[in-house]
Amino acid sequence: MNRLQVYESAALSIVEQADYYFENSGEALSFRWAAAIDQAIGSILKRPEIGARCRFRSQSLADVRWSLVPGFPKHMIFYQYDRAELTVTVIEVLHGARDIRSILGDEEDTK
């Protein structure tokens, strides 16, 4: 079984989105968001290569994948899978309208 690690920034993004839904749309949508995140991460843990590979310029982001949050088609989970360590690391959860490249630090390597 794969292990799960979640960056603090990703956990914060998940909680902030749940809070936003709770405040603006009510408890039901907030709970639906939490369940969808659980479902998405569970699917990634079972089949980590399910996500599409990102096409970032930075070498440090070369192995990043993304997957949609079910029921929230504009939200994406960005993660890395270390096959040797059997570890999935969720690095961020973002709305597609955000500046994803900038947030993830996709800057061209200057080597």
Image: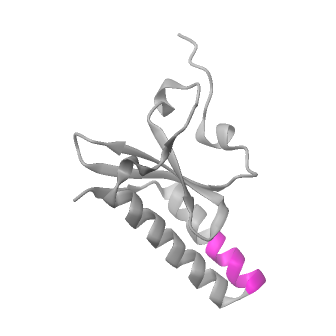
Q: Position of residue 14 (x, y in %)?
A: 57, 66
- Residue plotted at (61% across, 32% down): 106
Q: Position of residue 28 (x, y in %)?
A: 64, 89
Q: Nearer the viewer, residue 93 or 47?
A: 47
Q: Nearer the viewer, residue 9 or 83?
A: 83
Looking at the rendering, the stretch of residues picked out in magenta corresponds to 17-25
Left or right: 49 in relation to 35: left
Residue 53 lies, with reference to residue 77, above or below; the image says above
The verdict on residue 24 being magenta is: yes
Quarter holding the N terminus?
A: bottom left
User: In this view, which residue lies farthest toward the top?
Assistant: 111
- Residue plotted at (70% across, 78% down): 21
Left or right: 53 in relation to 30: left
Q: Position of residue 45 (x, y in %)?
A: 34, 59
Residue 54 lies, with reference to residue 88, above or below; the image says above
Q: Main secondary structure of the magenta part?
A: helix
Q: Position of residue 4 (x, y in %)?
A: 33, 58
- Residue plotted at (68% across, 38% down): 102
Q: Quadrant of residue 12?
A: bottom right
The image shows a total of numbered marks equal to 0
User: In this view, which residue lies farthest toward the bottom?
Assistant: 27
The verdict on residue 65 being magenta is: no
- Residue plotted at (38% across, 46% down): 49
Q: Quadrant of residue 23?
A: bottom right
How is the model colour-coded? one colour
